[in-house]
Amino acid sequence: MKRKSVAILGATGAVGQRFIQLLDGHPWLEVAALAASERSVGKPYREACTWRLPTMLPESIGRMPIQPLRPEKLQGIDLVFSALPADAALDVEPTFAEAGMAVSSNASAFRFAEDVPLLIPEVNADHAALIPLQQRRRHWSGFIVTNPNCTTTGIALALKPLDDAFGLEAVMATSMQAISGAGYPGVSSFDMLDNVLCLIPGEEEKMQQEARLLLGKFERERVEEARFVLSAQANRVPVLDGHTICLSVKLNATASPQQAGTVLSGFRGVSAAQGLPSSPPRPLAVCPEADRPQPRLDRDAGGGMQVSVGRIRECPIFDLKLVVVVHNTVRGAAGGSILNSELLIHEGYI
Amino acid sequence: MKRKSVAILGATGAVGQRFIQLLDGHPWLEVAALAASERSVGKPYREACTWRLPTMLPESIGRMPIQPLRPEKLQGIDLVFSALPADAALDVEPTFAEAGMAVSSNASAFRFAEDVPLLIPEVNADHAALIPLQQRRRHWSGFIVTNPNCTTTGIALALKPLDDAFGLEAVMATSMQAISGAGYPGVSSFDMLDNVLCLIPGEEEKMQQEARLLLGKFERERVEEARFVLSAQANRVPVLDGHTICLSVKLNATASPQQAGTVLSGFRGVSAAQGLPSSPPRPLAVCPEADRPQPRLDRDAGGGMQVSVGRIRECPIFDLKLVVVVHNTVRGAAGGSILNSELLIHEGYI
Amino acid sequence: MKRKSVAILGATGAVGQRFIQLLDGHPWLEVAALAASERSVGKPYREACTWRLPTMLPESIGRMPIQPLRPEKLQGIDLVFSALPADAALDVEPTFAEAGMAVSSNASAFRFAEDVPLLIPEVNADHAALIPLQQRRRHWSGFIVTNPNCTTTGIALALKPLDDAFGLEAVMATSMQAISGAGYPGVSSFDMLDNVLCLIPGEEEKMQQEARLLLGKFERERVEEARFVLSAQANRVPVLDGHTICLSVKLNATASPQQAGTVLSGFRGVSAAQGLPSSPPRPLAVCPEADRPQPRLDRDAGGGMQVSVGRIRECPIFDLKLVVVVHNTVRGAAGGSILNSELLIHEGYI
Amino acid sequence: MKRKSVAILGATGAVGQRFIQLLDGHPWLEVAALAASERSVGKPYREACTWRLPTMLPESIGRMPIQPLRPEKLQGIDLVFSALPADAALDVEPTFAEAGMAVSSNASAFRFAEDVPLLIPEVNADHAALIPLQQRRRHWSGFIVTNPNCTTTGIALALKPLDDAFGLEAVMATSMQAISGAGYPGVSSFDMLDNVLCLIPGEEEKMQQEARLLLGKFERERVEEARFVLSAQANRVPVLDGHTICLSVKLNATASPQQAGTVLSGFRGVSAAQGLPSSPPRPLAVCPEADRPQPRLDRDAGGGMQVSVGRIRECPIFDLKLVVVVHNTVRGAAGGSILNSELLIHEGYI
């Protein structure tokens, strides 16, 4: 198979850098263009960005000149990854979809549009079937698909098998989120050292809404939101990468911690999502240690694509409590977008 | 009034040091003796401990020789503060109570004994009435009172006015706790930097049990536990001092965030607890800022004795969500013990 | 004595906030006006700034409206503290001096002007005698005085008594600087967590130049730079407040660590600098402990105005090695400016 | 070639874990036994240690039972890596050498014995020729070789090419060291958060002595120490892995920063040390960026085996200033020991 030509929009930011890192040596995809805002256009990537990842910036990428965020400047591109901020994404992404390109977006701009799939392959690959509807309605030859917010990604992957097996009724979720989720420069070190920040604007709303969409059913060309209610409390803590989420879960059917553990560790996701280049060995790792998962030790499981779950125990109010760790800029951002694109290639959409 | 003579048991540890710091210049209390385990006995305090607080160790305290943990070596002492570990407290504290001294203990050893008051003055000063029962039953001329776990202290102070006004049914509590709560040396820096630890052994159980006891009713010489259920998830985060707790609260009566805010900021506690030397201006500070409380900025409110509350908002599952910050080694430990002793002096027990 | 009316330029930033905190309740000075850049003008201070200090913002300050950075808007002001960035200071500070006000500036803009004193009261109070020259030359009825860079302040205070006693020849200085020195928002938490930053632009040059000026001699209406050479390496580390500096010092006369310790702990500074409202008990604290000074434990010594020195030992290349800790936003910034103004009031310049 | 059978002494500690991680899949070496102190003997490795590295503990290693630290229990072993503390190493290592095994030790116990090589392959591979002398003198059929202290390793690799090209006279070295260098649990998080520790007992002495030995000449069966003088100041900072060292270097011949950069980036080390399984592409990476090296971004260069150098600039006192970053538990500990063993296999000593 010839590798697909890929462009990255918003290539210089924190998520943009992760796209470049994760696409280095990708068997199906090849970075052919980098685009960013006007002030970077024309500069070689190496000069336009402050590379902040501990792996080396690939030489050939470093030399690429930054292109403007306009589809007519990016000929021959099959697939576009968007790491744009939400407001920019709202304007820019449709122009690429209209010009015939597949857009796999990490931005929140179109996550709640009813004809745009919000996708986690293992959870709801079938929602991709919104694409033909989207193209018909919007008269686009390309299309947009989105991946959820970083925190929701971890939560939805942990909840999906529990919902399938026992039925979800209500979920309390308190997150302790890494600073890389705020982009770069993001959070001031003066605010973050020796501190916890109890407000991440907009985050709780995203978590509450996206989780129900992801676990919703695709029927008659639309996604019916799941019925359970999620209540979120989002916090920022002095951790570089890896969001930790404490969940309390109310189920329809009774389930012991052991039964839940078996269901979680047995989870494979829909078969279409298995064996893709960025698929982890299993979507979920259930930690046997009493004091895991921990973000520093578990965020890189499965190359950052595996979500770790642990401390499954009874809740005196609901049914179960558990702790989830997800790598927010890999599985929860760039890696999630890439996995979505792999699913769509595999399914013939790209 | 002549100042009471005070001894500190476990004077060299993290909580012991806080006792010394907070008692410096106290109008009612004077440190007359310091006691610790055998290996320190006889050494001047300055040599026996590694002083780790940013204020100066008072000169006169630094010169005091460490005494053994035996009442016969501490003649003329009216009041004993215990910063001992739970297992040592179990053996040592009764010997002091038997010898006629008042023991105000920060240890967990006797918190659940049905004749030992677990006290927060503003919350349940009336539970002090267990003391005569305790003395009668155990044939002690002295007695033991205890203060709750650091995290519970913040939770109970925030819940008390909500319970009084609206009736509590259920509380989900997820904590992000400071490392000073683990004592010294406590948590390894290699475990704590760039990380969250999702297990603090025994902590969740303490929080779940103590909160119901504190809000329980004293009737016919016993404390009837409150009926609400609390479910706790305890985490350690890279913060020096100040525990942050995210609460979701289910109430009997409906309450808007505004109503809850009014009730919380209006809270004064029982009158016996007001105006004591260590009483903060008000037990609770309700933060008007959207991003507060934060442990680094709010832990020292009211000299560390005031609990900060904020982000009061609706919960889509229960009724209200809010965030609490409490200084764990001041209000949640040494300062709590001292405030208890002030109440008991004021009430004539000491 | 009637208190002098004070204005703060750049009141909303990190150093501006320190000025407000340190001037609260000052016996000689009263904050009468706050000024900042255009986008804040007219707002009450509380809204114009994000207060980031753990002490409470004084109520009356919070209500003050922000003024523009123009002297004609600040009538009746005796003294102006400048917390402006260097480029703004270059334009703004002279307009206040010309309008007859005393400007005590923390900015670097005029530190090297040959008629502007660079002052640390205990070190070179006599350099204030440049003021009449400055007024004559520039036809100003007011004047500008400056305090050195935060790191230099700590170094110069530690070096002065060694220079006086033994004569300085060369100084190697490697700093580990707190993030508050970079202002707010300053350093990104993503750059700072689990990291050291080995470049602080312009810092090494300032340290190398300012130290020689401070220890220089005032003779015949000019300051003759000291002859010793300083070589600086400046680093940023994950510390909130308090710069730590490792020094290796080459002296003209031999000095044992004990002799140096005696000289350092005996240092009182020129008599004019003693007993001012912001003077610490002694300018230098020599730590007896083998592992001190440490920024978290020692930055607040003497209310942040005392510089801590320790680990005085032989250097196998030069003569002595020692470690210095200075509170960078108190003694090294706002507190230094305030102490300068107190000296000038005491000397009759204001 | 058949893989050599390897035992690790002190396998459960921080450096022991690094040995296991780095030897996983090694082409020449196979872990056949794990040994530790008495309290762990008999337990499977997984239970005896708290695995604290973010990569997975290899399954087969996890099941291995811990052996006692006695050579008679470790039959069939060719090579022993020692991650023991210095005092244990002093007693234990000779018993293995006497029993005929090669001991590649990370401990400091024998670093200064005049018949024991202190080795960095690229720097002084020829010092391995002390081995026959050692065997003859001590009547051992095996032998001990050591690698230097983690900090010295970085310094010596950076200094070697400068010494060869320009001749070293004096070196001022101020280190900012990672907490993993203190072992596990090592430094208390309460001491380390928001702080710098200016004392690492024994560290400065090691740095001062070892550097001269490493750059010394092997002549007539002994190592003649190099003549330059090194003065060290060692600090601990809140960084997980990677020591940063600021150097000021006095040379015999003049050298511009450009010339030094050319010499450093051209350094390859002695040819025997090139192309070994753990050799990095080049021993030194010279960072072109003005703000590098940084420990978090550069510690993993070359799999943690490459030392990064940057900020080469003139020193107003000596000749040059530069900054060095070395991964302290890879190149500076386990990886250094492994590279030494590879050299000795290649040279026929094992």
Image (cartoon, coloured by chain):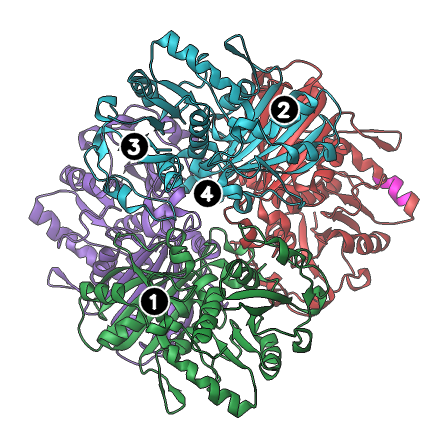
Chain colours: A purple, B green, C cyan, D red
* Mark 3 on the same chain as mark 4: no
Q: Tell me which chain the residue with mark 1 is part of.
A: A
| Tag 3 subunit | A
Q: CA distance from mark 2 to mark 4?
A: 26 Å
Question: Which residue is more in the foreground, C45 or A184?
Answer: C45
Instruction: Give the class, few, some or many, for how many residues have Cα within 10 Å of label 1's Cα (few <14, many ≥20).
Output: many
Location of mark 4 (residue): C240
Judged left or right of residue B258, residue D315 is: right
| Residue type at numbered disc 1 | Leu
Please determine if labels 3 and 2 lie on a single subunit: no
Find the distance from the CA under tag 1 to the CA under tag 3: 40 Å
A90 up-or-down from C259: above or below: below
Answer whether residue A157 is visible to the viewer in this image: no
Cα separation between marks 1 and 4: 33 Å
- Magenta-colored segment: predominant secondary structure: helix
The kind of residue tagged 3 is Ala
Chain letter of mark 4 equals C
Q: Which residue is mark 1?
A: A247
Which residue lies under the disc numbered 3?
A33
**For the N terminus of chain A, which image quadrant?**
top left
Look at label 4 and name its amino acid.
Leu
Residue D27 point in image, percent of width and height? 63, 47
